[in-house]
């Protein structure tokens, strides 16, 4: 069975593009369009990689990030923070595994996650 | 009126010619003197009447009376008619008196010979200065006539001396006249000067009054609030605009002190501090700050008022309502941030879908479809660049852009930029070359991300405006304290009159160029602002049809400041 990739992104188009990129990289993909859905998914699944938008409705990105880092089940999970805010990106530079500043290209994300998948 | 003034009025004659007036006054003095002698003679004659022969006493009395009457007549003539005529008659009268008052013997060559000197001298003083010669001639004539008539021999030496006296009188009198006329000229000039000065003073006062009323009218009518404090920080003038602006009643505001104004309830603690500092500002430089006054944003500037000698006489503060401008500025920044974010998300979506089409995620694509996807991608990237520039620009203007100093390798910076820009250059058929000065240290301290932005903006710009030839990037060290980024192109060049404006936002050399090459012209603005933020500057040299050279000069920092402190 393919490894799981979770895309947390409120914009529908970006969610589709990120999912396609992860699928192209060989992941099985789950998509969450708000923080609460993502939180529930994280309680029941153990994704290998999470693409995390920081601006989210209901539960925001930073608290989801805390949840992942606090959960021992998810200690192997690779978090790729995706944000349009350059200052937030800098703030997560040291905490997240990868930080991508929007606009994020399809090929860029596909190539990155492909490498992660092979690891 | 003193006796002197009375006497003065008695002998003063008014005349248009000051010389004439002087001569007539002098004549009056002589007439008065002679009159006095005549009166004394009459009094003495009457007192001594019994002691003399009655006939002799009568002659003296008659002669004296006739003399007195004659003098009176001359006085009248002198005062009312002609001074010259009176003086002439006076001298003739003297000559007559002297001619008959002694024996011919004594007159021709005796004791009375010298009395004729008196009318000769008087003539120079009472008439024209040269008239002493005429009187000398008359006197000589009288002597000669008397001598011939009485068979006597005239004293020719005395006659010669008459003319000598006349000559001396003439010299003295004419010198006196000249001196007097010079004095009169000086006086006239002085009078004129005084008059001019008075006139100037009067008009200056008038001007000052007009100026003051004009200033007052301006103060009353301008939209800016103005308050003037004296040296004790008490308000001396408040204009109506300030009353409206601060919403403090005029009677309270016009007696307010600077300290009271800075403690106004409409201000919070921070703004109180700012206003107090502004109003207490020393120095003549005008400083301007924004303060929050209740719901209003005010721009306040204060300056010292000095008098003409530079002596401080108070402080003036000008308040301008900045509420709307501040609101617009805030809106502009929010708008830009939102627009940039809102633009970037759909652009990201377009970028992603175009890539997926090109990568055949949704099924096979033919060559034309791949090319179309490429066009979409390159246009979206261009649009993204513009949005990024706008956001950078807004951040720099809002003071939010920060420079993060860290060690970096200039060689790596150059490699990165060449890698990014190479495709753009070769696509246009241009050679992209580079040069790294061996004098540059291996490692420098700076913000590599911002330096890369500067290099990319300059290179992008150079490629954009060059149709054939090359773009050359050079990093070098002109001196010990600086290093430079230089980008040279063989492009269209920039007209001289446009050179000073090329760093202004939203401007390109001419509109046809903008249409051909696209772009917002924000790139150079950002380069300049970033260079300034890093303590450097950007310069440009250009020649139409030959190309342009952009040089960014930056301070050379080898070690990061924190490392210097470590032992």
Image (cartoon, coloured by chain):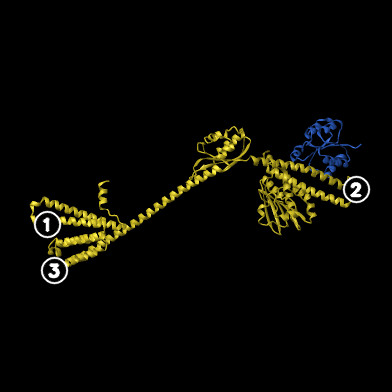
Chain colours: A blue, B yellow
Whether marks 2 and 1 lie on the same chain: yes
Please state if B59 lies on the left or on the right of B311 as rendered: left
Q: CA distance from mark 2 to mark 3?
A: 166 Å
Q: Earlier in the sequence, mark 2 or mark 3?
A: 3
Mark 1 closeness class: few <14, some 14–19, many ≥20 residues within 10 Å? few
| Quarter of the figure with residue B497 | bottom right
| Callout in the foreground (2, 1) | 1
Q: Position of residue B135 (x, y in %)?
A: 22, 64
Residue with the mark numbered 3:
B149
Q: Is residue B409 visible?
A: no
Front residue of B443 and B188: B188
**Residue at the spot 84% in from the left edge and 45% down from the top edge:** B353
Front residue of B212 and B555: B212
Please state if B561 lies on the left or on the right of A33 as rendered: left
Please, which chain is the residue tagged with disc 1 on?
B
Please, which chain is the residue tagged with disc 3 on?
B
Q: Are marks 2 and 3 in contact (CB under 8 Å)?
A: no
């Amino acid at each position: 069975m393919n490894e799981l990739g979770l895309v947390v992104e409120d914009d529908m188009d970006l969610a589709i593009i990120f999912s396609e990129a992860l699928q192209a990289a060989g992941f099985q993909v789950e998509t969450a369009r708000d923080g609460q859905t993502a939180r529930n998914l994280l309680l029941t699944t153990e994704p290998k990689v999470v693409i995390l938008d920081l601006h989210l409705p209901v539960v925001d990105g930073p608290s989801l990030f805390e949840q992942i880092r606090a959960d021992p089940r998810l200690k192997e999970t690779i978090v790729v923070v995706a944000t349009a805010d350059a200052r937030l990106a800098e703030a997560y530079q040291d905490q997240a595994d990868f930080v991508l500043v929007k606009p994020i290209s399809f090929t860029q994300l596909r190539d990155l996650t492909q490498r992660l998948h092979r690891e | 009126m003193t006796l002197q003034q009375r006497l003065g009025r008695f002998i003063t004659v008014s005349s248009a010619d000051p010389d004439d007036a002087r001569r007539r006054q002098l004549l009056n003095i002589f007439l008065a003197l002679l009159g006095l002698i005549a009166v004394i003679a009459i009094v003495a004659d009457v007192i001594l009447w019994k002691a003399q022969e009655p006939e002799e006493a009568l002659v003296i009395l008659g002669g004296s009376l006739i003399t007195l009457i004659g003098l009176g007549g001359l006085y009248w003539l002198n005062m009312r008619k002609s001074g010259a005529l009176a003086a002439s008659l006076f001298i003739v009268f003297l000559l007559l008196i002297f001619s008959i008052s002694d024996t011919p013997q004594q007159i021709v060559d005796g004791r009375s010979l010298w009395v004729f000197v008196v009318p000769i001298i008087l003539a120079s003083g009472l008439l024209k200065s040269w008239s002493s010669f005429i009187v000398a001639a008359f006197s000589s004539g009288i002597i000669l006539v008397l001598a011939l008539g009485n068979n006597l021999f005239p004293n020719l030496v005395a006659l010669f001396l008459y003319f000598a006296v006349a000559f001396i009188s003439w010299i003295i009198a004419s010198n006196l006249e000249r001196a007097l006329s010079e004095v009169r000229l000086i006086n006239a000039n002085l009078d004129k000067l005084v008059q001019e000065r008075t006139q100037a003073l009067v008009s200056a006062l008038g001007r000052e009054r007009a100026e003051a009323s004009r200033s007052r009218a301006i103060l009353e009518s301008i939209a800016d609030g103005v308050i003037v404090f004296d040296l004790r920080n008490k308000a001396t003038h408040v204009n109506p605009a300030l009353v409206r602006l601060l919403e403090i009643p005029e009677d309270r505001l016009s007696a307010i002190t600077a300290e009271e104004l800075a403690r106004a309830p409409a201000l919070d603690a921070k703004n109180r501090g700012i206003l107090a500092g502004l109003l207490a500002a020393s120095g003549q430089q005008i400083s301007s700050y924004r303060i929050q006054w209740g719901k209003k944003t005010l721009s306040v500037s204060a300056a010292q008022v000095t008098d003409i000698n530079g002596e401080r006489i108070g402080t003036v503060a000008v308040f301008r309502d900045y509420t709307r401008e501040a609101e617009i500025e805030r809106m502009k920044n929010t708008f830009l941030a939102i627009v940039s974010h809102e633009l970037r998300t759909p652009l990201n979506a377009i970028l992603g879908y175009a890539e997926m089409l090109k990568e055949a995620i949704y099924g096979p694509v033919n060559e034309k479809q791949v090319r179309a996807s490429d066009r979409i991608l390159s246009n979206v990237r261009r649009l993204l660049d513009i949005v990024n520039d706008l956001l950078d620009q807004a951040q720099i203007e809002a003071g939010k852009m920060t420079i993060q100093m860290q060690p970096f390798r200039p060689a790596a910076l150059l490699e990165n930029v060449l890698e990014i820009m190479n495709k753009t250059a070769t696509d246009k058929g241009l050679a992209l070359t580079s040069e790294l000065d061996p004098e540059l240290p291996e490692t420098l301290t700076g913000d590599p991300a911002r330096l890369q932005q500067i290099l990319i903006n300059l290179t992008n710009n150079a490629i954009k405006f060059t149709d054939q030839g090359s773009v050359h990037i050079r990093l070098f060290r002109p001196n010990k304290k600086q290093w430079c980024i230089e980008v040279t192109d063989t492009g269209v060049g920039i007209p001289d009159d446009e050179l000073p404006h090329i760093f202004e936002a939203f401007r390109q050399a001419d509109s046809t160029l903008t249409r051909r090459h696209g772009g917002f012209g924000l790139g150079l603005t950002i380069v300049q602002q970033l260079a300034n933020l890093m303590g450097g500057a950007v310069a440009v040299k250009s020649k139409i049809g030959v190309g342009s050279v952009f040089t960014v000069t930056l301070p050379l920092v080898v070690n990061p400041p924190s490392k210097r402190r470590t032992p």
